[in-house]
Amino acid sequence: MIGYYKPVEILCEDNGRVVEGEVKAYASGQYMTVDMGGMDLNMQWDGKLQEFRASRVGLDFVAQPPTSY
């Protein structure tokens, strides 16, 4: 679904750092693609934990669903 979303906070579970990302693509309850300063992060919905999750370069990332404008 194409829309305009507020930036989302993405937590790196390995080091505790939080960064903001711009939502590039989003399908509720399925996936979300986020631009983290030039690096795209493809996140998948985890229905059990009710959050988006991804792994990249050996790090694990977590985010909540975006809020639309």
Image (cartoon, helix red, strand yellow):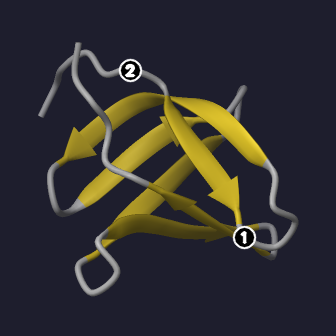
**Element type where label 1 sits in the image:** loop
Crowding near pointer 2: few (<14 within 10 Å), some, many (20+)? few
Location of residue 17 in the rendering, given as x and y in whole percent from the top left corner: 81, 51
Q: CA distance from mark 1 to mark 2?
A: 22 Å
Name of the residue lying farthest toward the right? 15
Quarter of the view holding residue 12: bottom right
Location of residue 50 in the rendering, given as x and y in whole percent from the top left corner: 29, 72
Name of the residue lying farthest toward the bottom? 48
- Who is closer to the viewer here, 1 or 46? 46
Left-right relation of 62 to 1:
right
Location of residue 55 in the rendering, given as x and y in whole percent from the top left corner: 63, 72
Seen in the picture, residue 32 relative to 9 is either above or below; the reply is below
Total marks placed? 2
Q: Quadrant of the N terminus?
A: top left
Seen in the picture, residue 62 relative to 41 is either above or below; the reply is below
Identified by mark 2, the residue type is Lys
Q: Quadrant of the C terminus?
A: top left
Earlier residue among tags 1 and 2: 2
Q: Which residue is mark 2?
A: 6
Quarter of the view holding residue 5: top left
**Which label was assigned to residue 13?**
1
